[in-house]
Image: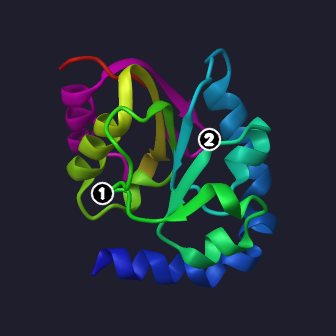
Amino acid sequence: MKKIRIKEDYDKTAKIYDSRYKAIQFIKYQDMLDGVEVNGKILDLGCGTGLLAEFLSEKLIGIDISLEMLKSGKSRELFIQGDMENLPFKNNSFDAVLSFSSFMNLSDLKKGLIETKRVLNKDGLFIVTLLEKKFTDVFLVELNNLFNVQEIKKIGEDVGFVCLNTNK
């Protein structure tokens, strides 16, 4: 099962993740969030060790399937082990949902996008990136069906999307 394999892979790399990827992730965050205002209650999907919270210097809620990644983070009290396809939050709970290089790991991409839409406030901000080599037209179709895509950016090895949660 894909979820189990992904969890195991990230569990194995948790202790070295920050030293290996922090600089790359921070550049990705800077480039993707340049000119975008992110505020309110924020959810980080696939938060890993919490690098986005560190970058933003903000409290946010993070969810990740890998308990070891969460344990390796510095702000564990705001992080929850969970599944992006079955989010443990009420409808309309967040003003912004951000996900950097996580959606491509989902077993059911559409279900993850539907869950994101569900927990995001109307007119809320959704920012998502995925590795360009994992990007498919199916992802773009599903994203366009559920969200109003405002901007598409090429960010290093990733493709990023800035979206609004509108009534589609």
Expressed as whole percent of the image width and height from the top left, the position of residue 16 reads 75, 75
Residue 157 magenta:
yes
Instruction: Work out which quarter of the rendered image holds the N terminus and state it.
Output: bottom left
Find the residue positioned furthest to the front.
90
Magenta-drawn segment: 134-160
Instruction: Please give the label number shown on residue 156.
Output: 2
Q: Nearer the viewer, residue 153 or 106?
A: 106
Residue 61 point in image, percent of width and height? 58, 48
Disc 2 marks a residue whose amino acid type is Gly
Neighbor class of circle 1 (other Cα within 10 Å; few <14, some 14-19, many 20+) is: some
| Distance Cα–Cα, label 2 vs label 1 | 26 Å
Q: Nearer the viewer, residue 101 or 146?
A: 146
Numbered disc 1: secondary structure: loop
The quarter of the picture where the C terminus appears is top left
Read off the residue under disc 1: 85
Asked if residue 25 lies left or right of residue 116, the reply is: right
Measured from the top left, where is residue 54 in percent x and y? 78, 47
**Total label count?**
2
User: Is 34 left or right of 74, judged from the image as shown?
Assistant: left
| Residue 20 quadrant | bottom right
Which of pointers 2 and 1 lies earlier in the amino acid sequence? Answer: 1
Amino acid tagged 1: Glu
In the rendered structure, does residue 148 fall within the stretch colored magenta?
yes
The disc label shown at residue 31, or none: none
Viewed as shown, does residue 129 lie left or right of 140?
A: right
Q: Residues within 10 Å of mark 2 (few under 14, many from 20)?
A: few
In percent of the image, x 35 and y 38: which residue is there? 119
Residue drawn at the location 34% of the way across and 41% of the way down: 116
Protein image colouring: rainbow
